[in-house]
Amino acid sequence: MGALLAYAWDENKVLVHVKDVPKGALCRCVCPICEQPLYARKGEKRAYHFSHAYNHDCKGSDESLIHKIAKEVLLEVGRIMLPPSSGKFPSGLVKLHQVEAEKWDEHYHIKPDVVGIMENAELLLIEFYYSHKVGKKKRRLIIENNLKCLEIDLAFQVFDKASLFDFITNSTDDREWIVPEETVQKTETEDISHISSRNPVYGQANDLLRQIFAENTLYLHPYLEYQDNYSMFDSDALYDLKELGYDFHKAHYNNRRFKCDILLSKKHEDGKKSFIAISVKGRRRTEGFKYPKNWLIIDIIPKRGSTLDDIKERWAKAVIVKTPAMNVIYTNFDKWYRRERPLPKVFA
């Protein structure tokens, strides 16, 4: 073990300092890292500290403790204060969706301290440090992929949840972006133009979809696409994606085999996830394209000459529906329907 452990959880899992509890096992404290019993050591030769009972092997220390508490606070509050921005980056207090700690990212091959989705559907990574910043390998992967990753220094903070809550949500001190703001903005612009099939209207429509979902929800209306094959669908049936449990997963998803503008996800009781991939495109995907077999894929294809105002008018009620001026192509809808068995609402 490195630094001496000066803080522990009491019987109610309240953080206490070793000087404020009885000596020895009478302290009735446990380690916040491994939750094993502790002794309060209050001798004369060494500084007061907690030690593990029964010689339990734990790598806990003040550094790992404050790191753990900071992650717990962020998971609980789901909000974080971002540093000032020139306008190209988000700034101020932001709310996070799908906040998770120590989650391995299969796409980027990194495990951030905390990851969440901002209201604008962008991925935000948070790294806390006490004495050692993000390592070279992880830092290189973050920079190479132009990820929005905030690095926060905890060295000057006290070991108290209330204080850390105030620091995380009300202060802009001791935090900075790992990738410079202007670098990420340039790359994102290039990526968006590629995903949007070189037509700026598609990119704007994609942003509009994200905004509609963030502020309200999106409704699927598959009848017109499937009316010849599925007599069970009422022509006025709507499926509310937020009511079904879907939330933002990632914007501008792109891997070697498949890409989409918006990726939504839902976690089921058995721990498995369902995904819905939505894209605004200039044309149909080529026959036999490779796609995730269990995902519901929705491609929205505005007809030639459609303007953003036309699209806004068609999406005024947040309904994704096929019209004479816009195709909506569903892939894997039958599999999704059998898995979800959603109860349709009637479009009023």
Image (tube, rainbow, N blue to C red):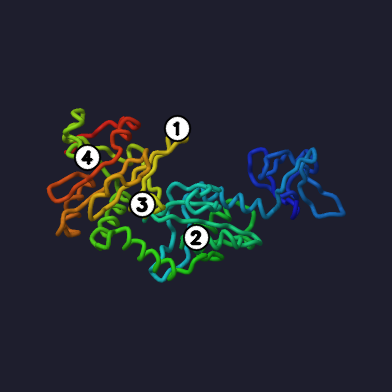
**Mark 3 lies on residue:** 259
Q: CA distance from mark 4 to mark 2?
A: 37 Å
What residue type is disc 4 on?
His
Q: CA distance from mark 2 to mark 3?
A: 22 Å
**Going by the image, does 91 lie left or right of 66?**
left
Q: Which mark is residue 200?
A: none
Q: CA distance from mark 3 to mark 1?
A: 27 Å
Residue extending furthest left? 324
Please tell me in which quadrant of the rendered image residue 264 appears. Answer: top left
Query: Residue visible at 20% across and 30% down?
Result: 230
Residue contact at pointers 4 and 1, CB within 8 angstroms:
no
**Secondary-structure class at tag 4:** strand
What residue type is disc 2 on?
Cys
Residue 68, percent across and down?
61, 49
Residue 258, percent across and down?
37, 50
Image quarter of the C terminus: top left
- Tell me which numbered mark, 3 or 1, is placed earlier along the sequence: 3
Q: CA distance from mark 4 to mark 1?
A: 26 Å
Query: Residue visible at 87% across and 53% down?
Result: 44
> From what the image shows, is residue 238 above or below residue 259?
above
Residue contact at pointers 4 and 3, CB within 8 angstroms:
no
**Mark 2 lies on residue:** 149
**Mark 1 lies on residue:** 269
What residue type is disc 1 on?
Glu
The local crowd at label 3, few if under 14, some if 14 to 19, many if 20 or more residues have their Cα within 10 Å, is some
What residue type is disc 3 on?
Lys
- Tell me which numbered mark, 4 or 1, is placed earlier along the sequence: 4
**Secondary-structure class at tag 2:** strand
